[in-house]
Amino acid sequence: MKAVVVLAMGWVVGSHAQASLLPQWRADLQRLTEDAVRAAVPAPAQSSVEVGEPDSRLRLAPCAQVQAFVPPGQSLWGRSRVGLRCLQGAVRWSITVPVHVRVLAEAWAATQPLPAGATLGLEHVVRRRVELTAEVSPALAQAEPPVGRVLARPIEAGDAVRQHHLRQRQWFAAGAPVQLRLAGAGFSIRTEGQALTPGWEGQTVRVKLESGRTVLGQAVGPHEVELPW
């Protein structure tokens, strides 16, 4: 979630002042984050953004033009940070401000406490609204219930079933024949190859084509590899 907006407004007059968000700055940071979140989550999801305060120990020089930005490497998911930097002033400064992003949507949740090693049945999961951003690991939001999946760690009743709860599946072994697919806007290409490395769910795999060329793709299903576009 990346976005940039320029805020053209003055800073307090005088010498270095304690960092504090002006109302206009807070409103623009709020808008910046909300727009980025809405662009990244599905329409049925509900999201909210809470903008915090910068470190009270900071002292900032006067600035006539400030830019809000998302720092490199920051994902606006859960507890994160956005930035403010001075573009026009005697002293150029840059600070970050905490934000808390919450996204609520329907996903699969456990109906009862389950231990690691348990195999999920239909009676173990239910669709309910959960906070997707409560953890970094993605919640399982697909339409099909995760029946037959084995838990890699215990889960409590009511908790969202997340990727890190499940044992990783091996879709195929090294040396196995695989189907490769490449899909883009208005086209889809399929070909065959031989896996040179094991195909673990969601992991990169090396595949040798009939021509002898080696390509990298992602293991996405039984004997299925998706090539990057």
Image: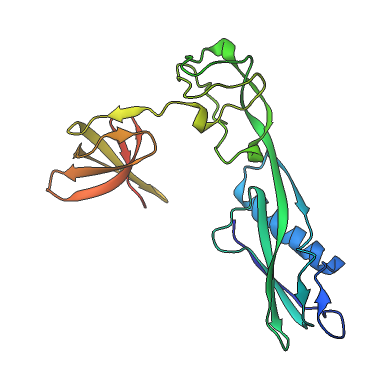
Across and down, in percent, residue 177 comes to 19, 32
Residue at 51% x, 24% y is 153
Q: Residue furthest front?
A: 57
Residue at 31% x, 38% y is 225
Q: Is residue 11 visible?
A: yes
Looking at this view, is 180 or 55 the one in front?
A: 55
Residue at 37% x, 27% y is 169
Work out whether 185 lies above or below 131. below
Determine which quarter of the picture holds residue 223: top left
Looking at this view, is 91 or 189 the one in front?
A: 91
Q: Residue furthest top?
A: 123
Relative side of 152 to 50, left or right: left
User: Total of numbered circles in the picture?
Assistant: 0
Q: Residue furthest bottom?
A: 90
Across and down, in percent, residue 14 comes to 87, 86
Looking at this view, is 229 or 153 the one in front?
A: 153
Relative side of 60 to 148, left or right: right
* Colour scheme: rainbow
Relative side of 25 to 38, left or right: right
Relative side of 107 to 210, left or right: right
Determine which quarter of the picture holds residue 2: bottom right
Q: Is residue 222 visible?
A: no
Residue at 49% x, 17% y is 147
Q: Quadrant of the N terminus?
A: bottom right
Across and down, in percent, residue 227 comes to 32, 46
Across and down, in percent, residue 197 comes to 23, 38
